[in-house]
Structure formats: structure tokens, C-alpha cells
Image: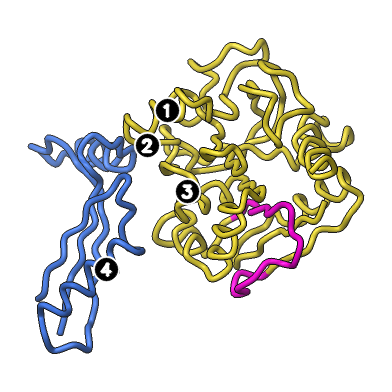
Amino acid sequence: MKAAVLLFPGLNREGDAMRALEQASGLKPALVWHAEHELPAGTDLVLVPGGFSYGDYLRCGAIAGRANIMDAVRAHAARGGLVIGICNGFQILCESGLLPGVLMRNRDLRFICKMQHLSVERADTPFTTAYRKGQTIKVAIAHGEGNYEADEETIRRLEGDGRVAFRYCDAQGAVGGAANPNGSTNDIAGIYSEKLNVLGLMPHPENLIDPLVGGTDGRGLFASIASFSRAA
Amino acid sequence: MKARVTVTLKTGVLDPQGKAIEGALRSLGVEGVASVRQGKVFDIEIDAADPAHAEAMLKRASEKLLANLVVENYRVEIL
């Protein structure tokens, strides 16, 4: 699998993302600077990592979402190429128009950094085949703006078309209520594009790939992508 | 020419920052505050001399970058 990890000023999770991709695929991803106009030839997957691009100025992800390289990412996605945005990367994908909706300030106004359980809503997409449908996984969250909002029609469409990827749940898998950390609509932690080839999520699966640091529940996501690319 | 773009949250969009400011004003004893919504103001200097042209340019700027039309409205004023 040829993966490209995008780099914008202010991101800080690109190293973690590259490590997770290399662990799953055996290949070192390319690091691509935002001012570039093209992705490396033969790129299968574009990963937009987390952090604080442009210091979260204006709105989270607003400036990065309009960078040169995002035109190439839009073209890659239109061709059916895989794209994943994690945390600030999810915000960037929303601001770039690749995913609908917006990530607003957390309901309680606090930056939240903790372990969080997620429910895997479907296991038949390029990103989730290594999981079971309905499986509860434990990953990390670290964000101040993770409260997913969209107009009613968009939410209806996301729900109706099975485009919710992950929801916040408790350790027993019960979705929502006190397990929703940020007030996100319908407990949404991640969503897919219409063709299921673009995924955005607030939690950090790339930080849960080593038993020494909290667990390995994030590995499934990278293993899924790697096996999808092998089969393609 | 000087212009001002004001970006505000659409009605119905939850504004926890506005709510916090509203609470703070009450606790400071400022009376009569019914509600607070927080927004952004951009003061922009423009090279163009034609106000209609400037307004069209600022609308483009607002829709391309300054406002996220999913949750925000904008208003352009030529000062």
C-alpha cells in the first residue's frame, strides 16, 4: 500500500500516523507538504493527521482545507482513492468539502484528552473489515472541537445511507448518554463519504497500536486499509 | 476603501462560548442580558475604488474562506 501523509504547519500527529501505517503495511508512507500540487504517483491512501493546523486560526481546519494539495486530494477521492482524516484531519476534510458538516466547540467548552470507547457501526468498508459490526473498541480522544453538527437533512442522509462510521459508547457498548464526550449529534465520532472511500473521525486509532501504550484496538483500522489495498 | 465582514452563527446552532459569556455577564452583575451569541468581525482594507466591485469580491472571500456556510451567516459592509 502506497500511503501519503499530508503535512500542514501546526500538525503534530504525523509521526504516529506514519508509524501505524508502516506497522500495518510494511511500507514507509510518503510525507507530503501542503504546498505541493500533486500526490506521489500511485498513491492508494491519503492520510490527513491530527494536530493544530495554522494554530486553529479562523476555524479548525479552515485554512488547511483550502491548501494547494487539497485539490489533488479531492481528485484522488473522486477517482475512488482512499482518504482518512483523523481529528484535525477530520476537521480539514469537512472544511475542504470532502465530508459534510462541521466540528464545533465541545459542549462543555473543555479540551478533552482521555480514553474513549467507540462502537464500530459497520465492518464492510475499506477501513473496518478487521473489526466486527457492533464491536466496541477503546481508543484515545484529544480535541477541543469534536462536536459534529450538520443540518437535519444531512444527518438524515448520513443515517439513512449507513454513513456513520463510529459512535461514542461506554465500555459495555451502550451508545450515547454520558458516553458522548462532546455533544456530537447522534453520538457521531466518525463519518464516511457517499462512496465510503473517505473517512473522517475525531478519535486517534493511530495511538492504539502498541500494547506498551494503552492497547491495540486501533490496529484494526490500519490492517483493514492495508488488506483492502492488497486486494485491489 | 475600508470594509467590514461580520460572521455570525446561524439561528439554532449551539453556541457554548456565547452561553459561557452570557453566564459570566450575569455573574458580574450586568443586568438585562437575555442571551449572547458570539461572532467574528473582519476589518478589511481594499485597493479597489468601485464599491460594487469591492462588495462582490468580499462576498467571494466570505463564501470561500471567512464563513463556513454550514453553520454561519455573513454580512458585508463598505465603510
User: Quick check: A104 left or right of B37?
Assistant: right
Residue kind at label 1, given as amino acid type: Thr
Residue at x 68% of width, y 66% of height: A39
Is disc 3 in the same subunit as disc 2? yes
The blue-coloured chain is labelled B
Instruction: Give the residue number, with chain letter if any, for mark 4.
Output: B60
Task: Give residue A147's quadrant in the image.
Answer: top left
Q: How far separated are the C-alphas under marks 4 and 1?
A: 30 Å
Question: Quick check: B67 above or below A212?
Answer: below
Q: Earlier in the sequence, mark 3 or mark 1?
A: 3
Q: For the magenta stretch, what is the residue range? A: A33-51
| B45 drawn magenta | no
Where residue A16 appears, as percent x and y from the top left, is: 77, 50
| A44 drawn magenta | yes
Where residue B3 appears, as percent x and y from the top left, is: 16, 75
Q: Secondary structure at mark 1?
A: helix
Q: Are marks 1 and 2 in contact (CB under 8 Å)?
A: yes
Is disc 2 in the same subunit as disc 4? no
Between circles 1 and 2, the one closer to the viewer is 2
Q: Secondary structure at mark 2?
A: loop
Instruction: Give the residue number, with chain letter if any, for mark 2.
Output: A150
Task: Identify the image's colour scheme: rainbow, by chain, secondary structure or one colour.
Answer: by chain
